[in-house]
Image (tube, helix red, strand yellow):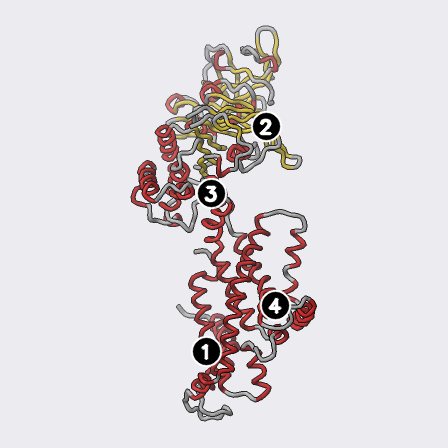
Amino acid sequence: MRRSLADWLGISWLMLVLVFLYAPILVMAAMSFNASEFYQLPFQFSTTWYERLARNSAILDSALRSVVIAAVVTVIATALGTAASIALWRYEFRGKRVLQVLLFPPIAIPWLITGTAMLIFFYAVGIGRGTPAVILGHVALALPYVIVVVSARLTTFDRSLEEAARALGAGPWMVTRAVLLPWIAPGIIAGALFAFAVSFDQFVVSYFLSAPGDNTLPVLIYTAIRKGFTPEINAISTIIITVSMALMLLAARFTKFGGER
Amino acid sequence: MSEVRVEGLTKAYGSLRALDDVSLRFPDGGFFGLLGPSGSGKTTLLRAIAGFVAPDAGRVLIGDQPVENVAVEAREIGMVFQNYALFPNMSVAENIGFGLRVRKLGRDEERRRVAEVLELVQLGPLGNRRPHQLSGGQRQRVAMARAIVTRPRVLLLDEPLSALDKSLRVDMQIELKRIQRELGITTIFVTHDQEEAMTLSDRIGILRAGRLIREGRPEEVYADPQDAFTARFLGEANILTGVAEEGGLRLADGTLVHRPQGADAGLIAVRPEHLEVSVAEPACPNRLRADLRQRVFAGAMGTCVMQWQGQVLKSIARHDDLRDLPETGPVWLCWQDRHARALVQEP
């Protein structure tokens, strides 16, 4: 079949968008394999920066800390968010509308302000700075995302399935576990991915709430840039991107991005 | 197996009375059809028996036991939903076994009973399929199997055949009746399809605007509808209005016809199959002069559509008997005294 001019324009536009999205990342990935510390060309393949990364305990420690925090945040935010979504969906109660509306502003409030507010609040209640504060802060940021994604999936749930399960003798817990959760699982997985991403990418709130020296990876990278950038940062970033993209592709395969199976 | 009763059941949604003081007995082992137009409350009644709807007044008894304090999951009912509501994340066998799993009957017992019921609904080899891999008729059977495998005290069917196409529906009606007879389970069945209700049910109840209008054996209700709504809703009826006077009923065109007992309101019904059409004036106690407008051929039977005093009248007869009639033109209509049924005004 011949393609029309409009088709070609569309395809070119798509290419342009892809270049816009991926060119900086590809340049960074390429430079992580370039021998020159100052990004000089010609390109000389080298794994120096990866070797140096392997010996850089500061970067590795902060990367591990980021992963652990993100994992804990993902578990807490996904569990709380899923439970909250189910409660909002299942029950009618006074103030439900207000509650639903109040869930959205945290997504829109600048993180700088949320971070400042949290720092003040955590000092006021005696939590102070440190890993617990970072985790609490990240959970608060991630919760609305989980609720939005899981709630969207819940609206597609056919209530007669719940009724059918009850007619067959299943109590509320059994209905939730055997019928409702399997249906919203794609939403829960998507929500968990969001929660992980919100936590792992988080700079502002982490910067405010981390105890001095206990840097998460984004905070460490920020500090490193100020002191002078080395391609080791490119190397760790390249690793992170590869892993996240693999995770996303895996999630997309399992959830079809929340679509019907 | 249990008898089901509802007593004075009332349910309002805002100003809408979905159920208005409905009392009914659903005999043990019987097949009861609840019939009515949409919004008549038939589904609300079924859902109240299941326990999904809490009545404002009145009560439901299953096997002489009041169930207002018994949750849906403890009522020991089997229910088939209009859209079947098969669990999409489970195979056919898992769907059917769900109620047994809930009851913790053990792996072996579960497998045995699932296999047994799969045979009963003639789905033997399909146990491992997923619901989305099945045809409409097969899904219907799975829903049915899932509802009966737990040996419930009562089987509730909410328009279970309405999603199927016509020919499949007739097959499934026969199946449904066979399974119900085999199990002897008290069955309550909601439909808006009067033909289906008459085919399947031992008894029917007709609802309108939340009220029970009529209850009885289908033949009995059909033969003697008693009110204009039932006459029109269950089958077709020619309803004639006149003034009751000495010796008969004076119709709008001046004809005096037989007035059956009870027709003091001046309302009678004649079923289309009892209205004979002829060109020559018949020797008949009740005759009308009408205008034949149309003849509709429908296989073995044919329908004649007549105009009389601004009203449409219908006659159904074997096609062979209609051969001598013209396509259109003036005709005689005739019916026997015993075929005129007295009606009260719509309740």
Q: Are marks 3 and 1 on the same chain?
A: yes
Does label 3 or label 1 sit earlier along the sequence? 3
Chain letter for the residue marked with disc 2 in the picture: B
From what the image shows, is residue A116 above or below residue B273? below
- For label 2, the SS is strand
Q: Quadrant of the N terminus of chain B?
A: top left
Q: CA distance from mark 3 to mark 4?
A: 38 Å
Does label 4 or label 1 sit earlier along the sequence? 4
Q: CA distance from mark 1 to mark 2?
A: 69 Å
Q: Position of residue B230 (x, y in %)?
A: 53, 24
Residue at (44, 31) in percent of width and height: B153
Does label 3 or label 4 sit earlier along the sequence? 4
Q: Which mark is residue A137?
A: 4
Q: Which mark is residue A44?
A: none
Mark 3 vs mark 1: in front: 3
Which residue is under mark 3?
A170
Q: Which mark is residue A239?
A: 1
